[in-house]
Image (cartoon, rainbow, N blue to C red):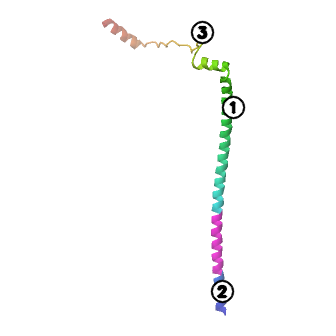
């Protein structure tokens, strides 16, 4: 009878060991799944944030374009565009164009050696 209880204990411990391994395996799979889902969730949240920022920028751009379109629909807006973009003026009207001042080129004084050489070349020329 002792041998039967010893075998029974070995069988129970083997069965417990297998159950423990299966549970550890399931736990590892579960942890991996949770990690993967967390990673995807963070990516989705980041994508949503970028999408909202882009939406705000597009709404601002849309409002600006609507304001420009409303201005262009008026005669004053059309005149502004024609004057700016195409440089058109009304008959008997003058136009003043302001540019950056033109600077004279800077004269660098010649060295003594260059002046001496120019003098010698000038004599024989």
Image location (x, y in percent) of residue 2: 66, 92
Image location (x, y in percent) of residue 13: 65, 80
- Residue furthest out toward the left: 124
Q: Residues within 10 Å of mark 1 (few under 14, many from 20)?
A: few
In magenta, the rendered stretch is 13-30
Image location (x, y in percent) of residue 48: 67, 46
Going from the N terminus, do you reach mark 2 or mark 3 first?
2
- Quadrant hosting residue 120: top left
Residue indicated by mark 3: 91
Q: Which of 122/101 is in front?
A: 101
- Residue furthest out toward the bottom: 1
Image location (x, y in percent) of residue 70: 68, 26
Going from the N terminus, do you reach mark 1 or mark 2 first?
2
Residue indicated by mark 2: 8
Residue indicated by mark 1: 63
User: Which disc number belongs to residue 118?
Assistant: none
Q: Which of 41/32 is in front?
A: 41
Indicate the secondary structure of the residue bearing disc 2.
helix
* Callout 2 touching callout 3 (CB < 8 Å): no
């Amino acid at each position: 009878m002792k041998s039967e209880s010893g075998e029974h204990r070995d069988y129970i411990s083997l069965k417990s060991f297998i159950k423990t391994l299966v549970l550890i395996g399931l736990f590892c799979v579960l942890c991996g799944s949770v990690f993967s889902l967390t990673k995807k969730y963070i990516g989705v949240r980041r994508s949503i944030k970028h999408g909202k920022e882009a939406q705000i920028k597009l709404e601002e751009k849309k409002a600006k374009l609507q304001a420009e379109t409303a201005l262009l629909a008026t005669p004053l807006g059309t005149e502004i565009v024609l004057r700016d973009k195409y440089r058109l003026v009304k008959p008997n009207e003058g136009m003043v164009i302001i540019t950056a001042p033109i600077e004279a080129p800077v004269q660098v004084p010649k060295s003594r050696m260059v002046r001496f050489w120019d003098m010698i070349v000038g004599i024989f020329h």
